[in-house]
């Protein structure tokens, strides 16, 4: 009977007033202990958000803002607390992880206080959350204003000890306070627990648990035996350990059974052994605090501890006593220093007036390095690791060149190794040395918010020796390598070689790239609903192109010199794309897995090494081709599936960038890839027209493919352009001709492999083909301009008897990004498109940025299978109702006609019709299928993107795609600068408009998390989701260099900061912390009107002045350069990280700044 407008006034919990926090959420950058932190005040007013806390070692920690967490080492199987999905981690607090309860005696009263228990709220409290800029520590703080006591704890890591929780309680009053505390950790996982046991059989797992307290109050948590129903003993001989230091006269509880007794004010007793129950490590202690006094203590938890490890720990604790606190603190600081060195090598630090920008840049660089890795020691490589890599890849080559490889020093120079390998004249040796990528700190982007990705942080052996490795989906890792390699530019050749050597004869790339095996592919798992095989498309063209552009900019002669060198390989992925007629028959089922080939490759790897995964010639050696062929093949693959005016036919069982558009496969056409192809074709034309070559030698089979495809395009080129539109019949004729040519090529290789014959193809012929293809591309782009000023991203294909019909989907952000990056839409047209984007349905005003696609009004559940009333008299409907075929159609009690609930799609409907077995129903099959499509419109079903409301779903912002808009706007701005276009100012304004919508420019309440941190997406109903390793970081590392004015071209660096703001220059002196090439921390005092950053680990100092000038400080003295271009000879020294340049000072006229 309560009115919805009723004002309740005070609400009571028994006799106590309910006192929830009502203050606004606030965020600010602060300094703690001399280091920068970000503080969120009243964070409990926000929805819980997720954080990734990093380390310089193999520790990982994922935590909720409400206190729930999972943490451990290396992988999820080595977790201190249950490794659940993010929703459960949010929910599990306060039953898992930290637990604190206090009995506070003050003013003659005894109070129970449980910090961080948000409900019920009986005290006036302020809760604050802090995260340091380094990203390896987080502090939770609660200030109890009623009791005059504050409590905080910090999560950190100490590589020699474990995960550390440092606690402090402070008496903020002027009076003495007596405190009795119970503090520690709950639901501690025993060693040898795999996530499956915890997720699915946790109650059975509990029965095996053994929680024991040893001397020095070391708690150990293990399984008394491993779980098994087999008739064999399985000892469990490792444990999770937890210990504490700092609390006086303490007792330790190994379970949570006495927590309730403590909260009732009753005494508790130490627990030395707990069996068959969840483990906890809770310390009970009492102390008195005088005014402003504090009490500090810590807990340390470690995984996978053996009897030897535990004995060493007990001995150390007995020896050090209270001194252990200092040792732990020093090891934490050592970890901070180690992280600084990693980030310094990747140019993560900048000194600006705008702390938000410098902190966000650091976070972008950090998460980019975490996913892609970091070059271990610049261009210095470990000879032993190089030899091991070559042995693993090709045992014969390693044996043949053993003395050559042994001739290098233990620490060799990468550039020297590649040069000398080329001099040896063995193409296999050259290929392997060029493909060696000395990366460490890499891991897949898995965490509890991405549970489908399994991470494995392998940085060192059990003996503590460093391991160099990387792992990742090829469509992810190469983008991170792009941003990372900007700071190590002479590795671009290596990265391009790695990319191209992993591409297949039919023009695609396998799923996984790693150091151990080179490449890996997915195998069919029919029973797994989320598993599939196939190839992505757009990533391949644009990611490869970006790498090629950078390589050309840094080393303009290198790429063209490789055009004719047969030093590249093909990946031999056991996928076979079906013949063209079969693709037409069912474009969703187009790839078969050749298990015989897969098994042969696996067996051959045992003797040959993992070069067995490459295409071999008739003699069993790796088949090599030149760079020109490797660049043409992926383009030919796309050109062979080009539905003119529609896009690239997605017929390889995978979508493109947005894999939530999974159902678009088969029916879908990608204009996104066409837009990127335009840029790729333009690059190829500039490359081929710049070289002095008459011919290019191609594999004869590829030459035939090229000739056939070129002939198809040339035959119909007069039909495109000039405002003309192809008929469906003309479009189908071109598509069929292209498909048959490609199919003939593929199957000639699938059956017999390359013949080994080579054919010389004139460069003029290749250029002619590219120019002709560009006409089709430009024509299709023009056709795909929408009435609202946007461009189509994906279209739909319908193959009729003689035609190829193209229909259109709704607007998508991907289409705008790719066309803005294509080179087709520039200057005023680009500004108009950006303006249209802000006026479109993809713009989300509350976040001032763009969704992937517009949100939509969807039918309610009761309307989703209802047959329209105007279809009720169809013969097929009447037949089903008359014959009471309720497994097909039925009429409900309200008179609505509905499809049966078991019919999830048209396949189910076909199966139900066949199961009925009657001739009468079979005659209505076509009518029922057409009606089903009318009701559900599955032809326009794009996949998960249209059926979920998180991730890449409806109403969601995907921050990687927003950052792609940012990069495109920046490229267009500089293009306008180069051309002297008056649109430059508009484009620059749009750049900062896009930038304004990114999280680091917002307060925590709006963004929903720490603003400086990158996140994957933001749904309409929550804040930022999925922290850290998102593609956004790569794009924003690049845009940051663009803001600083870095323009690299023809082997020189031009500094042209037309996007740099005066507000970034210091208003007062500030210390710039720098990590030099030797890993030393240096401090440089900057003045007002200056800013600092590093590039290739060399400090750059910008100063506002009147004219452009560059001053190079080197080990040989100071060199003055007039103008804004760093000469090529100094760029080479900078890029090689030789150490000869110690600092570069640049004076920038104020009139070029914003």
Image (cartoon, rainbow, N blue to C red):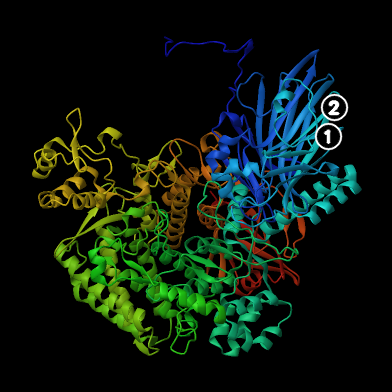
Q: Residue at x 81, y 49 (%)?
A: 330
Q: Is residue 784 left or right of residue 503?
A: left
Q: Is residue 76 visible?
A: yes
Q: Is residue 558 visible?
A: no
Give the crowd class for mark 1: few <14, some 14-19, many >=20 residues within 10 Å: some
Residue furthest right as drawn: 319
Q: Which residue is mark 1?
A: 247
Indicate the quadrant containing the N terminus: top left, top right, bottom left or bottom right: top left
How far apart are labels 1 and 2 at the CA level? 8 Å
Q: Which residue is mark 2?
A: 287
Q: Nearer the viewer, residue 1112 or 778?
A: 778
Look at the numbered discs 1 and 2 and tell me whether their residues touch, using CB distance below 8 Å: yes
Assign a secondary structure to mark 1: loop
Q: Nearer the viewer, residue 534 or 289?
A: 534
The image quarter containing residue 493 is bottom right
Q: Position of residue 724 (x, y in %)?
A: 17, 63
Q: Nearer the viewer, residue 192 or 515?
A: 192
Q: Position of residue 907 (x, y in %)?
A: 25, 52
Q: Position of residue 779 (x, y in %)?
A: 25, 64
Q: Earlier in the sequence, mark 1 or mark 2?
A: 1
Give the crowd class for mark 2: few <14, some 14-19, many >=20 residues within 10 Å: few
Q: Is residue 292 left or right of residue 348?
A: right
Assign a secondary structure to mark 2: strand
Vertical order, 101 against 1133 (above or below): above
Q: Position of residue 181 (x, y in %)?
A: 78, 28
Q: Is residue 1052 left or right of residue 817?
A: right
Vertical order, 169 against 441 (above or below): above
Task: Specify the label residue 1056 is tagged with.
Answer: none
């Amino acid at each position: 009977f309560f009115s919805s407008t009723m004002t309740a006034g005070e609400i009571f919990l028994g006799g106590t007033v309910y006192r929830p926090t009502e203050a606004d959420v606030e965020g600010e950058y602060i300094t703690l202990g001399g280091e920068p932190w970000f503080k969120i005040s009243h964070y409990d007013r926000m929805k819980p958000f997720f954080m990734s806390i990093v380390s310089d070692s193999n520790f990982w920690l994922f935590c909720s803002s409400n206190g729930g967490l999972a943490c451990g080492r290396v992988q999820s199987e080595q977790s201190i607390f249950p490794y659940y999905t993010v929703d459960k981690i949010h929910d599990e607090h306060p039953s898992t992880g930290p637990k604190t309860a206090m009995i506070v005696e003050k003013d003659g009263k005894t109070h129970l206080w449980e910090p961080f228990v948000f409900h019920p709220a009986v005290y006036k409290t302020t809760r604050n959350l802090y995260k340091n800029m380094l990203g390896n520590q987080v502090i939770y703080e609660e200030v109890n204003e009623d009791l005059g006591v504050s409590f905080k704890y910090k999560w950190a890591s100490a590589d020699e000890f474990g995960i550390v929780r440092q606690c402090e309680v402070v008496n903020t009053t002027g009076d003495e306070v007596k405190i009795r505390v119970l503090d520690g950790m709950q639901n501690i996982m025993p060693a040898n627990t795999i996530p499956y046991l915890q997720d699915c059989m946790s109650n059975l797992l509990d029965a095996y648990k053994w929680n024991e307290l040893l001397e020095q109050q070391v708690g150990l948590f293990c399984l008394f035996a491993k779980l098994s129903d087999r008739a064999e003993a399985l000892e469990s001989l490792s444990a999770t350990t937890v210990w504490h230091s700092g609390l006086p006269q303490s007792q330790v509880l190994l379970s949570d059974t006495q927590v309730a007794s403590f909260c009732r004010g009753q005494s508790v007793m130490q627990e030395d052994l707990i069996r068959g129950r969840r483990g906890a490590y809770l310390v009970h202690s009492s102390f008195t605090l005088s005014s402003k006094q504090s009490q500090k203590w810590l807990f340390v938890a470690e995984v996978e501890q053996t009897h030897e490890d535990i004995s060493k720990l007990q001995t150390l604790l007995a020896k050090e006593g209270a001194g252990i606190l200092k040792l732990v603190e020093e090891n934490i600081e050592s970890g901070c220093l180690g992280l600084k060195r990693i980030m310094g090598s990747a140019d993560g630090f900048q000194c600006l007036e705008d702390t938000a920008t410098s902190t966000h840049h650091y976070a972008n660089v950090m998460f980019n390095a975490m996913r892609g890795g970091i070059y271990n020691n610049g261009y210095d490589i470990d000879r032993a690791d190089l030899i091991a890599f070559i042995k693993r890849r090709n045992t014969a080559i390693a044996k043949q060149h053993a003395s050559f490889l042994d001739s290098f020093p233990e620490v060799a120079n990468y550039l020297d190794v590649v040069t000398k390998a080329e001099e040896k004249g063995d193409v296999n040796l050259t290929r392997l040395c060029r493909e060696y990528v000395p990366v460490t700190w890499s891991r897949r982007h898995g965490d509890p918010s991405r549970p489908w990705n399994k991470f494995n942080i392998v940085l060192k052996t059990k003996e503590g020796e460093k391991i160099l490795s990387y792992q990742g989906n090829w469509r992810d890792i190469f983008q991170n390598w792009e941003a990372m390699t900007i700071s190590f530019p002479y590795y671009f050749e290596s990265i391009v070689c790695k990319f191209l050597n992993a591409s297949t004869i039919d023009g695609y790339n396998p799923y996984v790239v790693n150091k151990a095996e080179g490449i890996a592919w997915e195998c069919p798992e029919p029973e797994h609903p989320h598993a599939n095989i196939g190839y992505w498309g757009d990533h391949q063209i644009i990611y490869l192109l970006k790498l090629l552009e950078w390589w050309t900019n840094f080393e303009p002669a290198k790429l063209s010199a490789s055009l004719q060198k047969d030093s590249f390989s093909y990946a031999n992925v056991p996928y076979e794309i079906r013949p063209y007629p079969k693709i037409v028959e069912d474009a969703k089922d187009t790839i078969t897995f050749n298990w015989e080939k897969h098994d042969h490759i696996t067996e051959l790897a045992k003797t040959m090494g993992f070069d067995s995964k490459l295409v071999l010639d008739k003699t069993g050696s790796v088949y090599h081709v030149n760079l020109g062929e490797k660049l043409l093949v992926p383009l030919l693959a796309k050109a062979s599936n080009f539905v003119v005016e529609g896009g690239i036919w997605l017929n390889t069982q995978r979508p493109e960038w947005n894999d939530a558009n999974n159902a678009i496969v088969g029916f879908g056409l990608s204009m996104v890839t066409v837009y990127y192809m335009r840029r790729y074709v333009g690059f190829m034309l500039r490359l081929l027209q710049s070289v002095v070559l008459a011919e290019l030698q191609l594999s004869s089979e590829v030459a035939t493919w090229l000739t056939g495809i070129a002939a198809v395009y040339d035959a119909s080129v007069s039909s495109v352009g000039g405002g003309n539109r192809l008929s469906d019949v003309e479009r189908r004729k071109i598509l069929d001709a292209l498909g048959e040519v490609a199919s003939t090529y593929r199957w000639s290789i699938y059956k017999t492999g390359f013949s080994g014959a080579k054919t010389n193809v004139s460069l003029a012929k290749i250029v002619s083909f590219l120019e002709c293809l560009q006409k089709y591309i430009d024509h299709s782009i023009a056709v795909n301009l929408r009435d609202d000023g946007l461009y189509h991203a994906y279209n739909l294909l319908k193959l009729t008897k003689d035609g190829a019909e193209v229909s259109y989907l709704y607007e998508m952000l991907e289409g705008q990004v790719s066309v803005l990056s294509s080179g087709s839409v520039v200057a005023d047209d680009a500004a108009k498109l950006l303006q249209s984007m802000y006026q479109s349905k993809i713009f989300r005003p509350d976040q001032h940025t763009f969704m992937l696609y517009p949100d939509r009004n969807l039918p309610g559940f009761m309307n989703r299978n209802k047959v329209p009333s105007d279809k009720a008299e169809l013969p097929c409907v009447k037949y089903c109702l008359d014959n009471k075929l309720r497994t097909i159609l039925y009429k409900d009690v309200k008179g609505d006609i509905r499809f049966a609930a078991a019919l999830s799609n048209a396949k189910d409907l076909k199966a139900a019709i066949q199961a009925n077995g009657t001739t009468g129903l079979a005659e209505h099959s076509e009518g029922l299928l057409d009606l089903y499509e009318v009701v559900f419109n599955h032809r326009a079903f794009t996949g998960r993107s249209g059926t979920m409301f998180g991730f890449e779903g409806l109403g969601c912002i995907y921050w990687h795609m927003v950052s792609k808009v940012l990069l495109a706007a920046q490229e267009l701005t500089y293009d306008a600068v180069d051309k002297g276009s008056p649109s430059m100012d508009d484009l620059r304004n749009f750049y900062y408009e896009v930038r304004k919508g990114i999280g680091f420019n917002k307060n925590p309440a709006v963004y929903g998390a720490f603003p400086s941190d990158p996140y994957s997406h933001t749904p309409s109903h929550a804040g930022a989701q999925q922290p850290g390793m998102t593609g956004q970081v790569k794009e924003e590392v690049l845009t940051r260099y663009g803001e600083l004015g870095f323009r690299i071209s023809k082997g020189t660096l031009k500094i042209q900061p037309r996007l740099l703001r005066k507000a970034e220059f210091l208003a007062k002196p500030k210390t710039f912390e720098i990590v030099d090439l030797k890993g030393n921390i240096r401090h440089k005092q900057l003045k007002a009107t200056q800013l600092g950053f590093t590039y290739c680990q060399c400090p750059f100092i910008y100063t506002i002045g009147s004219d452009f000038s560059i001053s190079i400080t080197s080990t040989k003295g100071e060199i003055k350069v007039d103008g804004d271009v760093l000469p090529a000879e100094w760029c080479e020294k900078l890029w090689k990280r030789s150490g000869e340049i110690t600092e570069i000072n640049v004076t920038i006229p104020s009139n070029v700044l914003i």
